[in-house]
Image (cartoon, grey):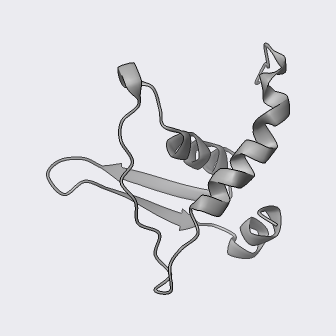
Amino acid sequence: VYRIMNSGYLSMPEFLLRLAEQCAPGKDGVYQAFIPTGKNGSQSERMRLLSFLELFGLATYEVEGGRNSGIFVRANDPEKLAALSR
């Protein structure tokens, strides 16, 4: 059960769509970017987007830390994800 405590959620759909558009893959089908950790341990916007995609069953992701850290994302339903981002 999720509870929304303020009206900040009203701008969330546009915000998430803007983020998704910024994460478009290149010609090789790969999106690559540096995602810094948030201030005081908070999540970055892209990490929040990944959390929402996973919450709705549209994608799964894995974060690996260390010297060669990386985030691996798998789109569970690429067609549905593409339709939602239009």
Left or right: 32, with 78 as reference point = left
**Residue at the spot x=48%, y=37% of the render?**
44
Q: Is residue 41 above or below residue 72?
A: above
Q: Is residue 35 above or below residue 6?
A: below
User: Whole-percent x and y of residue 48?
Assistant: 57, 39
Q: Quadrant of residue 7?
A: top right
Total labels drawn: 0
Left or right: 16, with 27 as reference point = right
**Residue at the spot x=75%, y=75% of the render?**
79
* Residue 56 visible: no
**Residue at the spot x=50%, y=43% of the render?**
47
Q: Residue furthest bottom?
A: 27
* Residue 53 visible: yes
Q: Quadrant of the C terminus?
A: bottom right
Q: Is residue 55 above or below residue 32?
A: above
Q: Quadrant of the N terminus?
A: top right
User: Whole-percent x and y of residue 24?
Assistant: 58, 69
User: Whole-percent x and y of residue 73?
Assistant: 49, 62
Who is closer to the viewer here, 58 or 66?
Answer: 66
User: Whole-percent x and y of residue 9?
Assistant: 80, 28
Q: Quadrant of residue 23?
A: bottom right
